[in-house]
């Protein structure tokens, strides 16, 4: 919350997005790709992850391949179906990236909450 009820900025909130980029400013992955990888980890299925995030399977696979190509290593392994159906799982590198991302997000969330509270306190109370 940006302040107490009745403050000028009461209904204003801060939002942010994280992106991994190359030194040449080429986007490697953003919130969408991270969400996709987390859903693959949780469901064991690229198709289920894509459906849950309302993107086509083709687009989801394209997002992952682009990131893998830029990074130079695989994030996801997939096995085609058979009688039990196919499945996808994160590689060790993909899993490490997601675990580090989750921790980074938690650390940034805590820092931003404190900084944002100070910001809104200053503009609401002019101190």
Image (cartoon, rainbow, N blue to C red):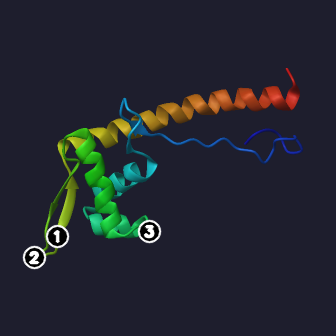
Q: Quadrant of the N terminus?
A: top right
Element assignment for label 1: loop
Image side of residue 43 versus residue 14, left or right: left
Expressed as whole percent of the image width and height from the top left, the position of residue 93 reads: 21, 40
In the displayed image of the protein, which residue is found farthest to the top? 127
In the displayed image of the protein, which residue is found farthest to the front? 24
Identity of the residue drawn at 13% across and 75% down: 84
| Residue holding disc 2 | 82
Q: Quadrant of the C terminus?
A: top right
Taking depth in this image into account, of 79 and 43 the one nearest to the observer is 79
Task: Relative to 62, say whether 91 is above or below.
Answer: above
| Residue holding disc 3 | 54
| Numbered mark located on residue 70 in the image | none
Expressed as whole percent of the image width and height from the top left, the position of residue 62 reads: 30, 59
| Residue holding disc 1 | 86
Residues under labels 2 and 3: Cα distance? 25 Å
Taking depth in this image into account, of 116 and 21 the one nearest to the observer is 21
């Amino acid at each position: 919350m940006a302040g107490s009820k009745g403050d000028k900025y009461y209904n204003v909130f801060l939002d942010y997005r994280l992106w991994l980029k190359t030194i040449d400013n080429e986007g490697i992955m953003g919130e969408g790709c991270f969400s996709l990888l987390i859903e693959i980890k949780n469901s064991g299925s690229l198709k289920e992850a894509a459906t849950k995030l309302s993107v086509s399977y083709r687009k989801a696979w394209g997002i992952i391949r682009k990131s893998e190509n830029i990074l130079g290593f695989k994030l996801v392994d997939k096995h085609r179906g058979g009688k039990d159906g196919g499945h996808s799982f994160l590689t060790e590198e993909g899993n490490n990236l997601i675990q580090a991302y989750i921790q980074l997000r938690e650390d940034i969330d805590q820092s931003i909450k404190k900084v944002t509270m100070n910001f809104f306190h200053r503009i609401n109370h002019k101190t």
